[in-house]
Image: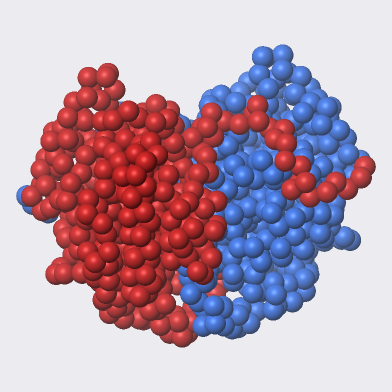
Chain colours: A blue, B red
């Protein structure tokens, strides 16, 4: 028997006839290859959703972690509870109180980032073909999780005040009329990814009412809730409905994503199923990460750190909006985020953000085309710009380059009629649906 | 709108009509309540599979982690690649070389413990009703993952030399005759959980041959491979077949489980699917944990640490075997592990390990009944004893107590005919199948 070479030599897939049906929904993002190019230093990437953790006091965190390992290492480095560390679950309740949530540590399941919480919720509720209602557009990582469970995503319209209640009512009715029932509504009420908008307080009450009447579970995904630039945090949907909402939270944006510590808050019976699913999936979330977060919350000024993050992101948001106003050609529109990481830009009519991306990367600027945020192929006329990571100067330069590419496209278009653009609005002819693995670069 | 109470007050499940079909396979272990009792200090637990990490040099690990955060914190605390840290993947190749594996860093997907690797492999290969072949008995955490994907587990017989090739051939033929095709064989060739035995070198070649002839993928789970008490590590199945084997590894037993760092080695096309599934599930494994493992491997004497672990576990294994020989009543038999964590005890005929467990816990000793390791309800006559965690004196005392309980059962049985015991051997009447979430306590 000879020792074979490592497998990269063999590119043939001997298993092609053996994969589970769900793998059909697991495909790499078409734009991933471009992002590899976009990660070159000369390209201004407005594509990534990585938080800017340069503001973290690394020496203090290093001390905290060293003390944790030296003093409680045999616990921190051991297996833990499938539900998560009890002390941390108590601290998570304190954090959520800032958004009006009155939860008990027993209600909480700690997860490997809130992405895992999303995966587990989908796992326990979704059979192949089941319907999930989600905002149009919606978080690419959620869409890819839903696709991996063969869910049928039905998008619900949004505007500058978030999810539109009438559209939600219509979607619920349409799903019912088709003989199905939506399993849950997936929504990001605060500083939406990718749109940057917030669900208004009036609409929050209305959405809760509609969902209660339809007996529709809400999955409230809230990674950015504490990153508002003005005033106090918005009141969570979960604050006003403990039985009808599963709330997903994360320390990725308020502390650091590399720890992968998120959580789900769920009604008792749902929580029990989440823990069983979590145990089958990873046994227990990393105790090392959990106790690091717990020690950080206990010993470090975490509220002041969130304030630092907020100020840093506000400055970047301002730079982006200012540059958009300065450089964008007429016909382009964009949202005005009051927090979070993202601005949603809609191109002048007839332009296609996905078709334009290679030219943008050539002009040394990158973004995520709007199609990534739709399960049904829409969104070609839009793009997500992130202001979280680059410096304000780089943001301004990136928007300037992008505006240049758009202006060139418009010029070409007026000269030659331009390349065939995708549907500019929902309701046009739908290209074949694409579902894309998020990739951490799109988080 | 009033603020509702936290949900523990409400025990009614409003969602009972809404869960995915797969949740039927997610049920809590019936013995979990007992284990809560068993965690009291006066009970000697021979149930848990927790590694004994008291032997770790915590100060050195603390220094390593502190330096990592202080010097490379903005990388270690950030999102990372869905496939895992590249440096760590190279180091994993070095570790696997000890078992004859010649892999390339590209072949490797880093996972949240090898449990997640198992979850991802199952996710990409198993549709509901698909057949998985697994040893009889098999790892409880694997069975619970398989159940959560609605797999149909077909057990294959083992003896002291591991999986029995003829039984494997028969199982493959039987599955074919039923019009199905097994998607993969799940096996733990080294220091098997729960049996403690190893697949002999002769059988390794034979099993590879059988699987190649049947075009059957092997999933080789190897958490204990470097924890052999005598001689060099066994040659991995993956070492002799790069295209037919997906290999799962873990740092949980050679370093520490609280970091949750494991991995899968897979042929190129399978690896691509694993990464997409991993991204949909957790975006990326914790970079913080991965770089901690990487820095530990780079700066600490990890080979010497494994030697320390091996010596500690050997002393405990010796204590357990010695106590079994001293105290066990005639009719009980057990395996002779040459490494790992576990001894598999088969009770004198007619005794039922699950029925006996409450009485054992009353006598202040705990174990895992054999039924936990079967998808089909068998195993009632056996139990798994772990020697990994308690001190040698506690192990001896635990076995003494256990032997006392067994002797009492035998006495009662000879006086009154005893309680109706479950089937003592595979092939007897099968009780209703149970599938159990592993719980980290059973890992």
Along the line of sight, the residue nearer the viewer: B361 or B175: B361
Along the line of sight, the residue nearer the viewer: A19 or B143: B143
Drawn side of residue B216 relative to residue B4, left or right: left
Along the line of sight, the residue nearer the viewer: B97 or B316: B316
From the image, which quarter does the C terminus of chain B lie in?
A: bottom left
Q: How many marks?
A: 0
Q: How far across and down, in percent of the image, does residue B247 sit?
A: 28, 51
Q: Is residue A33 above or below residue B393?
A: above
Along the line of sight, the residue nearer the viewer: A10 or A288: A288
Residue that appears at 59% across and 42% down = A273
* Quarter location, residue A381: top right
From the image, which quarter does the N terminus of chain B lie in?
A: top right
Q: Is residue B96 above or below residue A33?
A: below
Residue that appears at 27% across and 19% down = B178
* Quarter location, residue B408: bottom left
Residue that appears at 66% across and 50% down = A264
Residue that appears at 38% across and 72% down = B394
Is residue A112 visible in the rendered image? The answer is no
Q: Is residue A64 above or below residue B41?
A: below
Is residue A262 visible in the rendered image? The answer is yes
Q: How far across and down, in percent of the image, does residue A140 sit?
A: 60, 43
């Amino acid at each position: 028997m000879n020792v074979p070479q490592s497998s990269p030599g063999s590119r043939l897939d001997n298993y092609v006839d053996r994969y589970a049906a769900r793998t059909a929904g697991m495909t790499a993002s078409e734009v991933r290859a471009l992002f590899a190019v976009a990660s070159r230093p000369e390209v201004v990437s407005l594509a990534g959703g990585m938080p800017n953790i340069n503001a973290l006091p690394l020496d203090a965190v290093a001390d905290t972690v060293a003390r944790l390992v030296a003093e409680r290492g045999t616990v921190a480095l051991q297996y833990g509870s499938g539900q998560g560390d009890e002390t941390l679950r108590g601290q998570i309740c304190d954090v959520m109180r800032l958004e009006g949530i009155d939860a008990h540590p027993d209600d909480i399941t700690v997860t490997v980032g809130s992405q895992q919480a999303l995966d587990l919720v989908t796992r326990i509720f979704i059979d192949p073909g089941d319907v999930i209602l989600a905002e149009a557009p919606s978080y690419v990582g959620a869409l890819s999780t839903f696709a991996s469970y063969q869910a049928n995503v039905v998008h619900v319209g949004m505007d500058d005040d978030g999810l539109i209640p009438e559209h939600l009512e219509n979607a619920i009715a349409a799903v019912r009329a088709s003989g199905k029932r939506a399993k849950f509504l997936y929504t990001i009420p605060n500083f939406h990814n990718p749109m940057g908008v917030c669900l208004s307080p009036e609409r929050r009450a209305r959405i809760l009412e509609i969902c209660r009447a339809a007996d529709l579970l809400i999955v409230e995904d809230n990674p950015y809730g504490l990153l508002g630039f003005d005033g106090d945090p918005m009141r969570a949907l979960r604050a006003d409905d403990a039985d009808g909402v599963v709330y997903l939270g994360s320390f990725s944006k308020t502390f650091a994503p590399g720890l992968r510590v998120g959580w789900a808050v769920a009604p008792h019976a749902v929580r029990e199923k989440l823990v069983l699913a979590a145990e089958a999936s990873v046994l227990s979330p990393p105790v090392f990460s959990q106790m690091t977060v717990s020690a950080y919350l206990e010993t470090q000024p975490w509220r002041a750190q969130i304030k630092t993050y907020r100020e840093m992101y506000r400055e970047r948001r301002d730079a982006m909006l200012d540059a958009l106003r300065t450089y964008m050609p007429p016909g382009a529109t964009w949202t005005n985020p009051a927090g979070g990481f993202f601005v949603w830009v809609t191109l002048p009519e007839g332009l296609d953000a996905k078709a334009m991306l290679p030219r943008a990367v050539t002009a040394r600027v990158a973004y995520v085309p709007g199609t990534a945020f739709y399960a049904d192929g829409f969104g070609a006329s839009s793009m997500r710009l992130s202001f979280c990571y680059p410096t304000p100067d780089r943001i301004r330069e990136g928007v300037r380059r992008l505006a240049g590419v758009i202006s060139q496209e418009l010029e070409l278009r007026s000269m030659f009629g331009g390349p065939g653009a995708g549907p500019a609005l929902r309701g046009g002819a739908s290209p074949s649906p694409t579902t894309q693995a998020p990739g951490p670069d799109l988080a």
